[in-house]
Image (tube, rainbow, N blue to C red):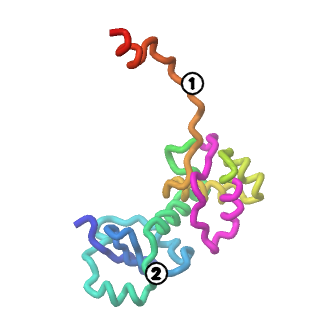
Amino acid sequence: GPGHRFALERDGVEILVDPAAGRYHGPALLKPLAGLAAAEFTAEDLGPEPEDWDTRAAAIGPAQPLSRLLWFAALQAGNGELLPGFDPGARYQLLKWPQTEREFPRHFRIATVMMRGAARLEEIAATTGVPLEEVVDFVNANLATGFARPEQPETPAPAAPRQGLFGRLRGR
């Protein structure tokens, strides 16, 4: 079925993915997964569940949250461009502190600035001294995992109806 466990391999790097459990087994570091994250996969690539799953999983490494893999794939996906459907001119904010990876030391600086409040991508880059493309990639990764969102523009409150429920009930 669609939720079955499967193995993926690219450039000699293998991961085992368990969608139902929300986990994967793979290298502790993310950068070795760049080839996997950038690759296009079809349903045929997934194949059947490996019979030697437990042996292979133990050899590859401990289970890690699938959200970490999603975060890294989204980090790679935009190549410095905001993911489709998001406005490059909008202000972006972090809703909660994300998992920052030691492999990406500048992300800590970006997260610190974004936790202070919504800001434009260029402002974040200028404040942190991090190249804009790297800021955009970080924002993409956190949009994909639900840690960031564009600031909602202030919309004027709708005019209150002349008579609310209380008034109607009282007016009977």
Is residue 153 positioned above or below 167 on the image? Answer: below
Q: Quadrant of the N terminus?
A: bottom left
Q: Is residue 131 magenta?
A: no
Q: In this view, does 172 lie to the left or right of 111?
A: left
The answer to which quarter of the image holds residue 76 is bottom right
Whole-angstrom CA distance, mark 2 to mark 1, is 52 Å
Secondary structure beneath label 2: strand
Q: In which quarter of the image is the C terminus?
A: top left
Q: In this view, does 167 lie to the left or right of 157?
A: left
Residue shown at 50% from the left, 44% from the top: 85
| Image spot of residue 17 (x, y percent) | 37, 73
Nearest the eye: 112 or 89? 112
Q: Mark 1 points at which residue?
A: 156
Nearest the eye: 52 or 112? 112
| Image spot of residue 126 (x, y percent) | 77, 52
Mark 2 or 1: the one toward you: 1
Is residue 132 positioned above or below 64 on the image? Answer: above
| Amino acid type for the residue under numbered disc 1 | Pro
Residue shown at 41% from the left, 74% from the top: 24
Magenta segment: 88-113
Secondary structure beneath label 1: loop
Is residue 129 positioned above or below 37 on the image? Answer: above
Q: Is residue 4 left or right of residue 58?
A: left
Q: Which of marks 2 and 1 is nearer the N terminus?
A: 2
Is residue 118 positioned above or below 110 on the image? Answer: above
Q: Residues within 10 Å of mark 2 (few under 14, many from 20)?
A: some
| Image spot of residue 44 (x, y percent) | 28, 69
Residue shown at 51% from the left, 21% from the top: 158
| Image spot of residue 30 (x, y percent) | 54, 74
Q: Mark 2 points at which residue?
A: 13
| Amino acid type for the residue under numbered disc 2 | Val
